[in-house]
Structures are given as C-alpha cells and as structure tokens.
Amino acid sequence: MKEKIAILKQALAGGVTSAMATPLHEDTYEVKTAVIPHLTDFLIERGVRGLFAGGSTGEGIVLPLAERKKLHEGVVTAVSGRVPVLVHVGSIRTDWAVELTEHAAAIQADAIAAITPNFYKLDDEDSLVRYYKAIAAAAPTMPLILYDIPQLATNGISPNLLKILANEIPSLVGIKSSRPDAQIIRQLLDAAPPHLLALAGNEAIALGLLALGMDGLLSGLSTAVPEPIVALVKAITNHDLVEAQRQQTIIRAILALTPSGKRIGWIKQILIERGISVGPAVPPRLMPDGPSWPQIQAILEQA
C-alpha cells in the first residue's frame, strides 16, 4: 500500500489534476461516452498530470449510480494508463459510496476520492469516521483521497478529523481541499502526515496555496482552460515566482468572467466552443448566454 501511495504522489505532485466535465446527452442524465476520449486527449495533450472523474465540476453527485459507473469506466478506458485516474465515489448515502468504490476497484481506477455526505450537518466526527472507514473497507488496497469542500457539502474535513483518518485508514493517500480560507488549509497541512498528498482546488488563490505547501492542484477550470493552470504549477516547480504570479493574474482574469450561478454551464460552454461536445449542465443549472471562449482566448493571447 505504501508503494501505491508513493507512486500516486510522485505522479500528481507538482502538477495539475483536471476535474473533468462530464459529457451528457441533451436533456438527459445520460453520459455521452463517445465524447470521453476526446476530452481526455484534449487534457493530456495540454499537460495535465491526472484526471478526476465525477467530482463537483463533473456533476457526479447528481447523476444516477449507473451513469456514474459508466463515466468512471469510460475515463479509465480512454486514458489507458497514460495518467492516473481518480474517480469520485462520495455520496449522501454510505451504501452508494461503497457500491461506487467496489466498482472503482473492479475497473482498476488508480484512486478514489470521496466528498463528505452532504446536506445533513454532522457535528460529530465519529459519523464521518464511520463513513470513510466503510469506503476504505470496500477497497482496502485502493488509495483514498478525502475531498474537502464544506461550502458546498455542508460537512468538511477538520484538521482533527484528518489526523484521526490518517491514523486509522492505511489506504489514505491524501486530501483535496477546495476551501477559500487559506488559514484552515494551513492547519490541514500541519495536521497531515508528511507522506500524504495535498491538492488545492481553489484556483483564485492557487499560487498562495502552493506556497503554503500544497503539492499540486486539482482544478475544475482546468477541464476547459488548462493552459494557464498548468503553466502556473510549472513555474512554481521551476522556482520562477515572477512567471507564477503572471499566470495567477491570468487565471484570476479568466475567473472574473464566470457568469453568476453558471460556473459548470460556463465551463461546458467553453469546451463546446473549443470543439469538445460535452453537452449541457445537468438541470436546473443553466448554460451562459452567448459565446464564452473568445473573451478567454483574448486574455491568453494578450498575455
């Protein structure tokens, strides 16, 4: 298990893991599997080091279990070992999370990631410990990444919970935190054992989070606009702070274009305009009005 964890950390640290958009047929909850290879090729060719299927940007939490499995299998097949594939198994129900974990093991995904159970507030950490232990027990040799995004999931990964899980789950490989609060992320880093992989999800402060000690980025924007995000991490790896600051400025300029309440639809619209027919966001999320890529392209060209 330690060898698996070390290999995954080596593959993803110092790079970008892209939280993929999920291709969907119009007006359905059905995954458009034929488009998955186009999207995986698009991302790998632009330098991402890993792919994350069915996360927040991938809308996995609102898809039927059968479609989530179809998505995960499609990504693993399309990637064919070129980069690590993380699949999202988190759910509001523990038995659904366990079922997705067993499927992830069957299709030989490289790792699983699990959001906390959402909607109901769980003030006791024992409930979350039981949830993550059940997931880990369903595939004890598969690396597990905790997915911390309390602003959407209601429940988050506290520094104390991270310590408990790191001590009690041998397959725990790391944490992905999308929190906006860098101080709490610093506390998570302080609580994490040195061998754990720490991935940041907040693109607006990505440079600061990498400077704090996060190992890499797990980014939703990078599924549509990977270029400046990959360039930012590369600049940090090369100890080029000026270039990293420049790329962070570009990323923030792109993020400023996000239409209110339509981030996922906006990301999908960009991909469609870049030639990847991912289809619409899952209802009731809306697509933006008018084209999105030309403004971003102008920012990249001007930079």
Image (cartoon, grey):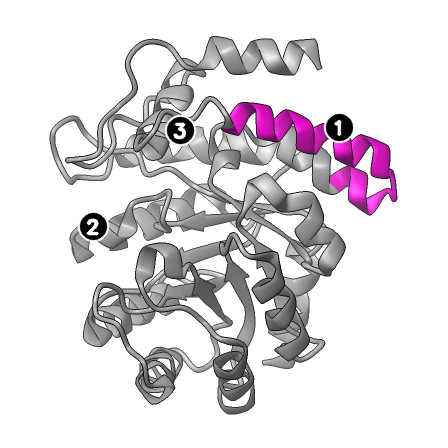
User: Which label was assigned to residue 267?
Assistant: 3
User: Compared to 249, does 121 lie above or below?
Assistant: below
* Residue 157 x/y as whole percent: 45, 72
Q: Quadrant of residue 215?
A: bottom right
Front in this rendered view, residue 102 or 294: 294
Which image quarter holds the N terminus? Answer: bottom right
Could you give the CA–CA distance between mark 2 and mark 1, rounded to whole angstroms?
Answer: 36 Å
Q: Amino acid at mark 1?
A: Arg
Could you give the CA–CA distance between mark 2 and mark 3, rounded to whole angstroms?
Answer: 17 Å
User: What kind of element bears circle 1?
Assistant: helix
User: Which label was assigned to residue 246?
Assistant: 1
Q: Amino acid at mark 2?
A: Val
Q: Earlier in the sequence, mark 2 or mark 3?
A: 2
Q: How many C-alpha atoms fall within 10 Å of the one at disc 3: few (<14), some, or many (≥20)? A: many
Residue 217 on the magenta segment: no
Q: Residue at x 38, y 56 (%)?
A: 151
User: Compared to 103, does 284 lie above or below?
Assistant: above
List the residue tagged with mark 2: 62
Q: Earlier in the sequence, mark 2 or mark 1?
A: 2
Q: Amino acid at mark 3?
A: Ile
Q: Residue at x 57, y 72 (%)?
A: 173
**Left or right position of 10 against 35:** right
User: Compared to 62, does 122 lie above or below?
Assistant: below
* Residue 64 x/y as whole percent: 16, 53
Magenta residues?
234-255
Residue 235 on the magenta segment: yes
